[in-house]
């Protein structure tokens, strides 16, 4: 599982990361609680 963490919120970069193998993405300004929720949901 790979979750990309980024400051960019544009579709092209997100699409590139998903096609490169990322399972998902979160923004760097996402709260720690939300990051943990995202990780748990990905498993």
Image: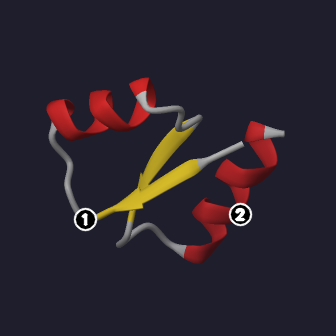
In the displayed structure, does residue 36 sit left or right of residue 8?
right
**Mark 2 highlights which residue?**
36
Position in image of residue 22 (x %, y %) = 53, 38
Nearer to me, 22 or 24: 22
- Residue at point 37%, 70% (across, down): 28
Distance Cα–Cα, label 2 vs label 1: 18 Å
Say which element carries label 1.
loop
Q: Residues within 10 Å of mark 1 (few under 14, many from 20)?
A: few
- Residue at point 59%, 75% (across, down): 32
Residue 4, compared with residue 23, is above or below; it is: below
Residue 12, compared with residue 28, is above or below; it is: above
In the displayed structure, does residue 40 sit left or right of residue 29?
right
Say which element carries label 2.
helix
Position in image of residue 41 (x %, y %) = 76, 40
Quarter containing the C terminus: top right
In the displayed structure, does residue 36 sit left or right of residue 22?
right
Circle nearer the N terminus (2, 1): 1
**Residue 15, quarter of picture:** top left
**Mark 1 highlights which residue?**
7
- Residue at point 80%, 50% (across, down): 40
Q: Nearer the viewer, mark 2 or mark 1?
A: 1
Residue 2, compared with residue 7, is above or below; it is: above
In the displayed structure, does residue 36 sit left or right of residue 30?
right
Position in image of residue 17 (x %, y %) = 38, 38
């Amino acid at each position: 599982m790979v979750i990309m963490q980024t400051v960019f919120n544009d579709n092209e970069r997100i699409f590139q990361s998903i096609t490169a193998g990322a399972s998902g993405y979160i923004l760097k300004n996402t709260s720690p609680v939300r990051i943990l929720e995202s990780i748990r949901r990905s498993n």
